[in-house]
């Protein structure tokens, strides 16, 4: 938990509506100085509206936002600071470079409109271009650059006047896969080097996991979970987070037993297997008889042509291979279990035939009991 007094960005009870539609509801977040926080969720979840509210491009219906020591907007106190007064930099999905300006002039624009003296302007602009590796292209027109280079121009422009916060609105969406990965790594490296507080919006789970100090998962205008990447992936609070962050096998069932950290869940897999009792972990604040989800990641499942024994015997389920997909360092196998399907990751050298009978199993500690 970040103390409100030491945070660089403090958002309390933010709410934004468009007519009768609630875009963001009761959003609360503290972002520490130098922290990289990602707002992650599907289209329409409210993440971009939240970012635009921080930037001053949307007016709040309720709540308050503080950047540094300044309240930049407060619905109750009738405070609204214009975007250019908020000490923020912004990198958009579109590169937003001016075609009639050189790379240098694009990057220097923010300093120039602030009346920065010429010697400081040249020094800061040159430094920003050096940081993103474009100092040798300073005199070239920005639209003559590649997509990745134009995005670097936008990044240099955002950091040039040393803002308190940089806001990223899906800046990598227009890049191809390889360049996207390269720019992702460059942004993280640069952010750590400069130490600027950053809030990044994306719908891409891999971007969020790789880049972030913390992730804010949103759905339907509401925060679902906040945590570091490992805790979000390993301990999702509900079925939405489990299935949105990576891949999760989710099975609906009834909680019939809790002993310590171990749960027993009764799952009906359909006519082929009827009811199966599986062991899992979690179950905090859940009641016996309650409908729950069992979540288990594909990489935590063992697949065998022989029935498992020992400590995974209780969680051993018979199934039929539907198909396998080669994904380089592993195979993704779809297994039909009654009326359900399960995704399993297996070694790429294993040979399985469509229609073959197999047994899937997992340790209780690799299963997670989630509220329905």
Image (spheres, rainbow, N blue to C red):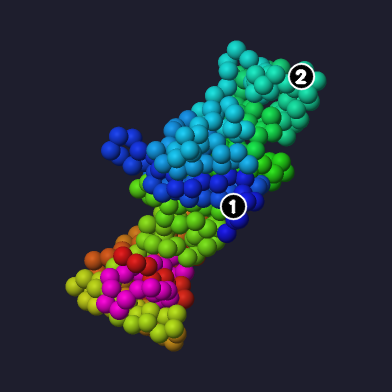
Can residue 70 be seen in this snapshot? yes
* Tag shown at residue 4: 1
Tell me if mark 2 has few (under 14), some (14-19) or many (20+) residues whose alpha carbon lies within 10 angstroms of its own: few
* Tag shown at residue 117: 2
Magenta highlight on residue 281 = yes
Q: Residue 109 location in percent, x, y?
A: 65, 20
User: In the rendered image, which quarter is residue 49 located in?
Assistant: top left
Picture residue at 58% right of the left edge, 49% below the top: 31
Q: Which residues are magenta?
A: 279-304
User: In the rendered image, which quarter is residue 276 located in?
Assistant: bottom left
Is residue 169 placed above or below 253 in the rendered structure? above
Magenta highlight on residue 290 = yes
User: What is the residue that sits farthest to the front in this orientation?
Assistant: 77
User: In the rendered image, which quarter is residue 315 located in?
Assistant: bottom left
**Position of residue 197 in the picture relative to residue 318 (left or right):** right
Picture residue at 41% right of the left edge, 41% below the top: 62
Which residue is more in the foreground, 351 or 229?
229
SS at mark 2? loop
Task: Report the quarter where the N terminus lies.
Answer: bottom right
* Tag shown at residue 232: none
Q: Nearer the viewer, mark 1 or mark 2?
A: 1
Distance between mark 1 and mark 2 Cα atoms: 35 Å
Q: Residue 354 location in percent, x, y?
A: 32, 63
Is residue 202 placed above or below 259 in the rendered structure? above
């Amino acid at each position: 938990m970040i103390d409100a007094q030491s945070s660089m960005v403090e958002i309390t009870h933010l709410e934004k509506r468009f007519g009768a539609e609630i875009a963001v509801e009761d959003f609360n977040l503290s972002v520490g100085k130098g922290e990289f926080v990602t707002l992650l969720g599907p289209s329409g979840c409210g993440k971009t509206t939240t970012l635009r509210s921080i930037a001053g491009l949307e007016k709040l219906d309720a709540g308050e936002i503080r950047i540094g020591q300044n309240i930049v907007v407060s619905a109750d106190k009738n405070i609204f600071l214009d975007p250019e007064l908020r000490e923020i930099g912004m990198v958009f999905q579109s590169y937003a470079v001016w075609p009639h300006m050189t790379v240098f002039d694009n990057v220097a624009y923010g300093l120039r409109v602030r009346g920065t003296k010429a010697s400081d302007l040249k020094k800061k602009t040159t430094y920003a271009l050096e940081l993103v590796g474009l100092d040798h292209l300073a005199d070239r027109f920005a639209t003559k650059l590649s997509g990745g280079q134009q995005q670097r121009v936008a990044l240099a422009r955002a950091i040039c006047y040393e803002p308190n916060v940089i806001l990223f609105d899906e800046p990598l969406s227009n890049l191809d896969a390889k360049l996207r990965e390269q720019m992702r790594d460059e942004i993280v490296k640069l952010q750590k080097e400069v130490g600027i507080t950053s809030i990044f919006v994306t719908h891409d789970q891999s971007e969020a996991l790789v880049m972030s100090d913390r992730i804010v998962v949103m759905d339907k205008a509401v925060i679902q979970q906040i945590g570091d990447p490992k805790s979000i992936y390993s301990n999702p609070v509900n079925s939405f987070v489990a299935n949105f962050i990576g891949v999760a096998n989710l099975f609906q069932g009834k909680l019939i037993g809790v002993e310590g950290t171990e749960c027993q869940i009764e799952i009906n897999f359909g006519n082929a297997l009827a009811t199966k009792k599986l062991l899992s972990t979690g179950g905090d604040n859940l009641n016996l008889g309650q409908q729950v989800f069992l979540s288990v990641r594909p990489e935590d499942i063992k697949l065998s042509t022989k029935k498992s024994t020992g400590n995974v015997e209780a969680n051993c389920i018979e199934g039929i291979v539907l198909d396998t997909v080669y994904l380089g360092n592993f195979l993704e196998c779809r297994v039909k279990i009654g009326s359900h399907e399960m995704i399993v990751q297996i070694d790429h050298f294993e040979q399985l035939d469509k229609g073959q009978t197999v047994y899937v199993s997992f340790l209780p500690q690799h299963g997670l009991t989630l509220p329905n």
